[in-house]
Amino acid sequence: MDIKWSVLRSVRVLLALVFIVFWIGAMPTNAANYDESKIPRYVLPELLKDQDGTVIESAEQWERIRRPVILRDFQQRVYGEAPSDPESIRYRVDRVIQRALNGQATQKEIVISFSDRPDGPQMTVLLFVPAPGNQPAPAFLGLNFGGNHTIHSSPDISVTSSWVRNDEGAGIKDNRASSAHRGRAAGRWPVEQILQRGYALVTAYYGDIDPDFDDGFKNGVHSLYHAEKKPDRHEWGSISAWAWGMSRIMDYLEQDSDIDEARVAVIGHSRLGKTSLWAGARDRRFAMVISNNSGCGGAALSRRQFGETIGRINTSFPHWFCDNFSWYISREGLMPIDQHMLVALAAPRPIYVASATEDRWADPKGEFLAAREATPVYRLYGLEGIEAEELPEPDQSIGGHIGYHIRTGAHDLKLFDWERYLDFADRHFR
Ligand code: GTR
């Protein structure tokens, strides 16, 4: 009897010890690593080998066997599953200005309602179509951070009625969009250049889809699906909601005869770069994917743990991802996926990943490696990805169907980046 009890007690002590070790192992460390020599040894999960050992040898096998598993892993473990696409999308063309921006474009504003509720969430899509000549036009679709009126100083753009993200991170008080902010983000949106190159520009304020703060998923489109109960561990966080919203914009674009729906590129910067990658992975109607400085949870390999880590991002922005993602804090090596697989999900469509030299928080090298490591999937389609072994020199664009550059400078979306994306689109869309 005594022996039995002491054995039992030892087992319990042992179990408790195992638990404590596991728990400590899962705690995020605070200091970001910027030292290449301190990157943990890692092995990337294999793109072209299925869980049962099947080696993927053709594009057909990739699409039938491997791609669905990887897509599902990202859906269930990282971004979270979005509700199925609504059967009918309600949109209203609110305003059309024929000769906007000094006659350079037709401007449209389209209100998309996410539900039948008159007080339900709505998004206003701003569309500039280049002046007549080459309709239907190819388009860039990107969400914006501060409201449509911030992308250009034109007084004709409606001021968003939603609350706008607070850049200072000081809560959301007193942060309503205002006409004083017209053109504030114009540096990131070279509207005239995009139009002159023959492309349409489509944008919407990301907070119209889901406000960017951790409110327990009570607002934005989440409110329509989670009035009673917060999302399950595998259900959508904000990035997934924003990506889902981009698909709703695509629903509209398919109906607009000014836009060539077969040539729509999704683009995004930073958290919205993570979003464009996920939008392109889950919705193959997007014909091109562009990730600008998307970093952790975007193009950067998680296993490198350089700059921002899964631990840091889940602590600062837990609402961006599904709850399952936090299980991988300090357990990067246990993920069946890494971000090169997210890049590969775009195949065979052209995808461009860009970094910036000073943006170490986003791990430029990790972004480059993820882009390069997706190459084997492009090869299955007979397409060129990235052959370079090393990070290219700054300000040089490389690659075939996978494009990459590292711009000199800080975390931002600059004219230099746009020019590379426009060249890339010219190459693949024309
Ligand atoms: C940072 C975050 C990054 C990046 C960036 C942004 O604070 O750590 O992952 O997404 O925000 O979106 O501006």
Image: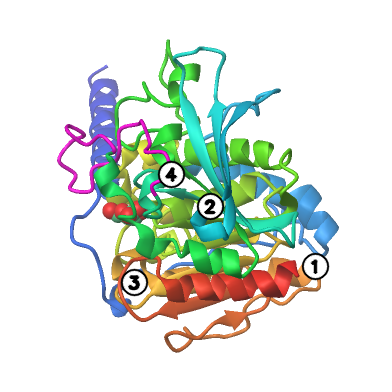
Indicate the quadrant where residue 355 lies: bottom left
Dot 3: what SS? loop
Locate residue 146 relative to residue 168 in the image: left or right. right
Which of labels 4 and 1 is toward the front? 4
- Identify the residue at image location x=39%, y=40%: 320
Q: Position of residue 147 (x, y in %)?
A: 38, 43
Dot 2: what SS? helix
**Residue flagged by tag 3: what amino acid is it?**
Ile
- Few, some or many residues within 10 Å of mark 1 (<14, 14–19, 20+): some
| Residue at numbered disc 4 | 157
Sequence-wise, which precedes: disc 1 or disc 2? Answer: 2
**Residue flagged by tag 2: what amino acid is it?**
Ala
Determine the CA span between mark 2 and mark 3.
51 Å
Q: Is residue 373 magenta?
A: no
Q: Is residue 282 above or below residue 378?
A: above
Q: Position of residue 319 (x, y in %)?
A: 35, 36
Determine the CA span between mark 4 and mark 1.
42 Å
- Identify the residue at image location x=29%, y=75%: 358
Q: Which mark is residue 100?
A: 2
Determine the CA span between mark 1 and mark 3.
33 Å
Residue sitting farthest toward the bottom: 393
Determine the CA span between mark 1 and mark 2.
42 Å
**Residue flagged by tag 4: what amino acid is it?**
Ile
| Residue at numbered disc 1 | 381
Dot 1: what SS? loop
Q: Which mark is residue 39?
A: 3
Report the predominant secondary structure element of the magenta stretch: loop
